[in-house]
Amino acid sequence: MRLTSKGRYAVRAMLDLTFHSNGNPVRLQEISTRQSISLHYLEQLFRKLRTGKVVKSVRGPGGGYVLSRSQDEISIKDVLDCVGENINPARDILAVPSSGIEVMKDESGNDINAIVDTKEFNLTKTYFENLGTIMQDYLATTSLGDLARKGASAAFATEQAGGSESTIRANVGEMNQ
């Protein structure tokens, strides 16, 4: 269960695009400079984001990228899916010996797969599958617009208080209200 830099960079770049677009195309060079992400890496990510139809490219002078839909119609899950990120904690639960399949030898010495079917294995498998469902639902119900609004209100609150605010959601259980 790991969100790689690819997914984090894609979400950061999309938020940068959301904050700085105002309906106008944003050049990747600008995002690269602001976010300290390699231009070459951003080009690879935005190629995938364009293929996934979350951004559109605008050619010519003043060109760059814009959101293909409203910021409220693009979920964080959409962005992560476009770049091939899979953070499901149960994604390989049947693929490796330590997660339920043990390679054993039959009477002839041939390899066979023996399925582990213990109460403990089934409980943990179900638990991590449920966790994956909750994570996917959380990502699917959080849009770029939600994060942009949280970021704007956090920046305003920080500016007023003179401190720093780093949380997007004050409560982990809060669901986009």
Image (cartoon, helix red, strand yellow):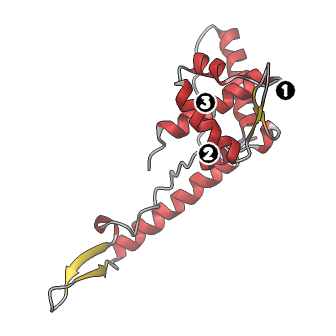
Residue labelled with disc 3: 12
Distance, label 3 to label 2, CA atoms, is: 23 Å
Vertical placement of residue 40 versus 34, above or below:
below
Tag 3 and tag 2, C-beta contact below 8 Å:
no
Q: Nearer the viewer, residue 130 or 139?
A: 139
Quarter of the figure with the C terminus: top right
Q: x%, y% of residue 12? A: 60, 30
Discs 1, 3 touching: Cβ within 8 Å: no
Could you say where residue 50 lies in the image, as x and y percent from the top left?
70, 42
**Mark with earlier residue (1, 3):** 3
* Circle 1 crowding by C-alpha within 10 Å: few under 14, some 14–19, many from 20: few
Residue at figure coordinates x 63%, y 29% from the top left: 13
**Residue 75 appears in which quarter of the rendering?**
top right
Which of the numbered marks, if any, corresponds to residue 23? 1
First in sequence: mark 3 vs mark 2? 3
On the image, the x and y values in percent for residue 11 come to 61, 35
Q: Is mark 3 on a helix, strand or loop?
A: helix
**Rounded to the nearest whole Å, what is the CA distance between mark 1 and mark 2?**
33 Å
For badge 3, the amino acid type reads: Arg
In the displayed structure, does residue 62 sit left or right of residue 31?
right
Mark 2 sits on what residue? 173
Of 88 and 80, which appears nearest the observer? 80
Earlier in the chain: of badge 1 and badge 2, it is: 1
